[in-house]
Amino acid sequence: MELRQLRSLIALAEADFNVSRAAMRLHLVQPAVSQHLKQLEEELGIPLVRRHGKRLLGLTEAGTQVLAHARATLAGAANIQAIGQDQKADPAGVLRLATTHTQARYVLPPLIRRFRQRYPEVEIQLHQGTPTQLVDMVLRDAVDLAICTEAIGNHPDLVAAPCYRWNRCLVAPLGHPILELKPVSLERLCDQPLVTYVFGFTGRGHFSDAFAREGLKPKVAVSAADADIIKTYVREGFGMGVIADLAYDPLLDQDLGKRDLSHLFPWEVTRIAQARSKYLRTFQRDFLDLFQSEAAALVRERQRSGA
Amino acid sequence: MELRQLRSLIALAEADFNVSRAAMRLHLVQPAVSQHLKQLEEELGIPLVRRHGKRLLGLTEAGTQVLAHARATLAGAANIQAIGQDQKADPAGVLRLATTHTQARYVLPPLIRRFRQRYPEVEIQLHQGTPTQLVDMVLRDAVDLAICTEAIGNHPDLVAAPCYRWNRCLVAPLGHPILELKPVSLERLCDQPLVTYVFGFTGRGHFSDAFAREGLKPKVAVSAADADIIKTYVREGFGMGVIADLAYDPLLDQDLGKRDLSHLFPWEVTRIAQARSKYLRTFQRDFLDLFQSEAAALVRERQRSGA
DNA sequence: ATATGAAATAATGAATTCTGATTCTTTATT
DNA sequence: AATAAAGAATCAGAATTCATTATTTCATAT
């Protein structure tokens, strides 16, 4: 068994089992990948992909298992490479972060700025996805770190460190009656249409639970994947917005009134996670430390000033 | 980077950095291993082994890290091979167990017998060691499963399932006065010399703690790694023996009297553990299931009848 | 039925990997 | 200190492996 064979299998899976395309990505020629797969199947003695004649359709049962371990194996090899780079104190490299829109837009920018000053040679990649996708990316070693609020709690193959907590706030166009209410209640939130996050995103689970527990049912007029879109629809008059408190920008959002809602919903904890068996290069670990220590302070400041 | 290079590095570490010996084990010739190491160091750009001229002395800092990840990488490749074997329903294979003497001698035999009936083609290897060594073996993928009482509790890279609990009993030559005492107390155990397990073995930690908590200090005349040796010294008159209740054999140990001590010491829990990222072949998983379900019943029966 | 897109096969040439012989060092012994 | 022995690096050659191009075979869409 050779690492290149495993690489081809993975590329194949990521190219929807189009051999030519997989070969392209690997900077190889089609017959090479074709042979790698053949060799692997021959050595293991079992078919790894389902076929219809010459067309590859997908993985077999066994192929799925093999693919997972192939990823783990190559991740091991990548770790070794990383150790080498690190020991040479090579200042270049890639920091691959996966996160939700909220973090990328409202929390990360100042941290990334500081990180870049320290490591100008490091390329920073910001991948986005739903919380479940983020977890998947870290586990597949498609990214180095995931910054995430949910679904990351206690996966055995992840190491997650809590960083800060946040809650929701309500935003509405200035002059909107809800802004006058002293303490907003769950009931009042149900009076009028809401604009908030879609399911699977940014604490939407706990949000809905809070209403359900009281036997209430909010009227969600529009739901979107990120706060910017929500704010846009709020401005367009579709309803009151409920967004993460982090996502209210005192400068850019002066035309929107804000009301704290932390007495109505549980606090969410944002964590930064890595795959357990991942070797983090020094600069990657430094980012993790930076995020853990600085993001907490930053967010607290933001929450205090914006409140 | 090639898997063979990693294999050579590992063999090198396991052959005390004697290149020729490492080559032998790999069925290669000395220059091959020498080159593998050289290539690996060249690719990573850092030295992995400390040298004195041409002699290899040991790993560098970086080498230690690389070795660990090399093991993980090859374990991944081995998992893939195992999936292949398994899918072909190849009845042959190896079941590598690591355990302490007590389990190997007093618990495993009937289970191994049943397992062999079911899988006559599978070679069974019984490795022995101290609890810490057992953990290490599983983590290094030197064995498939470890059966172990201590130090296995919550290692993040292990999955451990509790199987049964046991405690200590006292053994002494028939006629010994201690056998007449109704409930034996810690104080009485301190009256006369004891023969028991050495440190680092089979619950010796909790054993000593129990005395220390009462401010007592037992007179340990002889300590040994397993119950058979302890019983031998008891028969020779060196003192009273304290062994695992499992280790008293009603048939073979008729010349020794037994007294239960479970009111004096905490119960120990024996677990069976595998490396988290390990793919277990069907027969290996079957053994695990067999052990988990049958060992509990077996031990309970033994403890009841022997009491 | 035909054309097209895609995967397998075959043959070639380049690169690699292992080996055996040799040289160079280090360590142990006298 | 000289010598012997053990062990590691170096080198050149043979065998193998690898990726490539060219070609054939096959499935799908029109």
Image: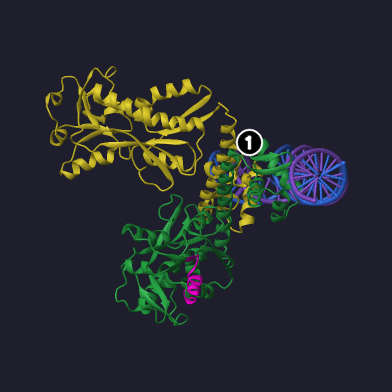
Chain colours: A green, B yellow, C blue, D purple
Q: Viewer-proximal residue, B265 or A213?
A: A213
Q: Quadrant of residue A61?
A: top right
Q: Is residue C15 above or below residue A114?
A: above
Q: Is residue A179 magenta?
A: no
User: Which quadrant would residue A272 be assigned to in this image?
Assistant: bottom left
Q: Is residue A190 above or below residue A63?
A: below
Residue A232 falls inside the magenta stretch: yes
What amino acid type is highlighted by mark number 1? Leu
Residue in front for this viewpoint, A219 or B250: A219
* Callout 1 crowding tier (Cα within 10 Å): few <14, some 14–19, many ≥20: many
Image coordinates of residue A50 in percent, x first then y, are 65, 40
Q: Which residue is mark 1?
A: A44
Image quadrant in which you'd find residue B204: top left
Give the magenta part as a residue range.
A222-236
Q: Secondary structure at mark 1?
A: helix
Residue A201 percent location from the top left of the image: 47, 61
Residue pictured at 37% horizontal, 33% vertical? B100
